[in-house]
Image: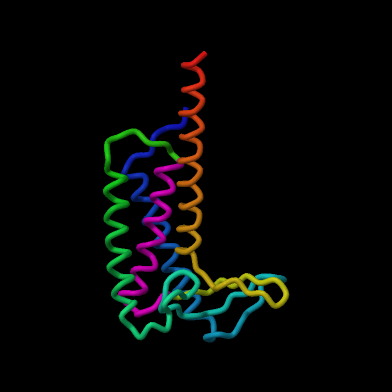
Amino acid sequence: MVPKLSFATCAALALLIIGTDQVTKWLAVGTFDYGVPMPLCPGLNLTLLHNTGAAFSFLASAGGWQRWFFVALATAASGYLVYLLRLPTPSSASYRLGLAFVLGGALGNLIDRLWLGYVVDFIQVYYRQWYWPAFNVADSAITVGAVLLLLSVFSKERLLAAQDVDRSV
């Protein structure tokens, strides 16, 4: 049986993600020239970029109002994630880990929006002439968290379906 993750453990994980995100962004800003790729290996550059929009630069050129919209959205989402983590109902470890990862990533990017007005991105993945939008540690944490949440939902549905089959036999 997988141990249940406490709120304190999930909060500590979220804080670790925030800290790692902010330190790596600080290093990127202090090390790289804006927009100049530094190749690490084929298919991977470190390239300092600023994103005033959301994922994939959605609404990046909207004129400035989007900053406060994304601040409000991240604040509300983070509050809801904390609420979910504080619920006394039992939930799987993958679900709680997923919430903690998403929370840490959302708050990491929220800090950038509040202090800088944009999110610092610096990881650039590419294949030949195709470039994935630049991202950061917070974005990676949100993605990992979303995958964990999906896995927890699908494994729970599979478990419930298996229990229904057992009851019908």
Q: Is residue 100 above or below residue 158?
A: below
Give 9 or 103, whichever is nearer the viewer: 103
Magenta stretch: helix, strand or loop mostly: helix
Magenta run includes residue 109:
yes
Q: Is residue 169 above or below residue 143?
A: above
In the current view of this chain or complex, which residue is farthest to the top? 169
Q: Is residue 7 above or below residue 133?
A: above
Q: Residue at x 42, y 43 (%)?
A: 95
Q: Residue at x 27, y 40 (%)?
A: 87
**Apparent side of residue 105 relative to residue 44 in the rendered image (left or right):** left
Give 104 or 146, whichever is nearer the viewer: 146
User: Where does the image place residue 38, in percent across and percent down from the top left?
Assistant: 63, 79
> How many numbered markers are drawn?
0
User: Where does the image place residue 90, in percent across and percent down from the top left?
Assistant: 34, 33
**Apparent side of residue 132 relative to residue 1 in the rendered image (left or right):** right
Magenta run includes residue 76:
no
Q: Quadrant of residue 105?
A: bottom left
User: Where does the image place residue 160, in percent across and percent down from the top left?
Assistant: 46, 28
Q: Which residues are magenta?
A: 94-119
